[in-house]
Image (cartoon, helix red, strand yellow):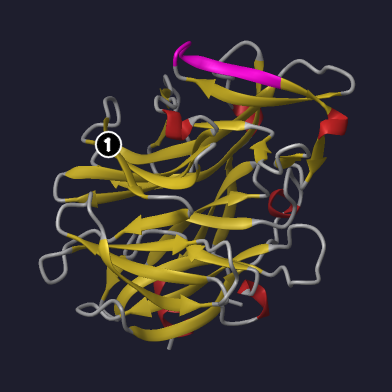
Amino acid sequence: MIPRLSSRCLLRPEDLAPSQDDLSVVGAFNPGVVATAEGVVLLIRVAETPRQVHTGYVGLPRWDVVRGHVITDWLPEQEVVFNDARVVKIRKTGLLRLTSTSHLRVVRSPDGRSLGAGELQILRPSHDYEAYGMEDPRICLINDRFYITYVAVSPHGVATALASTQDFNSFQYHGLIFCPENKDVVLFPEKIDDKYLALHRPTAAHIFSRPEIWLATSPDLLNWGGHQPILSATAAWDRGRIGAGTPPIRTFSGWLAIYHGNDKGEEDSGIGGYGAGLLLLDLDHPEKISRAGGQILVPEMEYERQGLVPNVVFPTGIINQGETVLIYCGAADTVTGVVEFRLSDLLEESS
């Protein structure tokens, strides 16, 4: 395992005020991250649950587009089955609901290792396809604009939407770019062969293959095609689930991509553990894997091993500092952490 130069917990749920008085913050994690002229910007997924507790009932929050705020549906506990701490299944319909709802919140850092003070900008759901929340953003600077891919969850399923900004004060929404079920979409920071590129993760209802990461191309960032699988599960640590993590960064050896994997086997109970691996993609033909490395991150710190979902390290952002890189992760579906590696160590690992 590659040695970490440093590990730090940047943000915890108790550091943030709830978006409504009747909600409680239970998670501040899985941030999109980008370096700007003013410092590092983190776009945090903030998960909230109902503050009230009704004995014998479970509260399932959702965004009400008409009212413009979160409301809670209270169901008798006997009418649901708890899949895990995050999800219940409605017995009558067999459909899933989340036990929390998420929005995105802008947090700024002067150096990427500590958070600054100041007002926090909130991006709230505003469409029906975000009724159950906005999750797991990734940020990519393309030309002079920051593009944000994020997961939109609703009764229609799990899809990926696109937004953009120039200053993280005002945002333009571009709508869905990958229909359900698809998530973990990360953009490349530049065109290749006059096309935009993205890594994504389709999730099939019928299991004909191991989990896979796919590559897609677009002329305009809105219409995507040319889909092809490029990476499937490689070992025991990513046999249960695999997906793109951080947006790829250009290095002299190729596009360095950090991805996540889950180790849950078919016969295993629970959720399983999440870690991270890396691969290098050819600079001119990123559908080709130049070199592949093994697992580089496993849950080690207490805040990575203990939380709403124990034993989770989920990479979503990366800052290239030249000799080192900062990798930002959600930890235990609860907090935001940052890990520093030598870039040379990562590139050697993938050789």
Find residue 286 and report its image quarter.
bottom left
Local secondary structure at mark 1: loop
Residue 67 falls within the magenta-colored stretch: yes
The residue lying toward the viewer, choosing from 26 and 348, is: 26
Q: Position of residue 63 (x, y in %)?
A: 52, 23
Q: Is residue 143 visible?
A: yes
Q: Residue, x 83% and y 17% (percent of image)?
A: 54
Asked if residue 210 lies left or right of residue 196, the reply is right
Q: Residue, x 61% and y 73% (percent of image)?
A: 238
Asked if residue 235 lies left or right of residue 103, the reply is right
Q: How many marks?
A: 1
Q: Residues within 10 Å of mark 1 (few under 14, many from 20)?
A: few
Q: Which residues are magenta?
A: 66-73
Question: Looking at the image, is 241 positioned above or below residue 128?
Answer: below
Q: Position of residue 180 (x, y in %)?
A: 46, 50
Q: Residue, x 34% and y 69% (percent of image)?
A: 215
**Residue denoted by label 1:** 38
Find residue 256 and report its image quarter.
bottom left
Asked if residue 87 lies left or right of residue 105, the reply is right
Q: Is residue 104 visible?
A: no
The residue lying toward the viewer, choosing from 178 and 200, is: 178
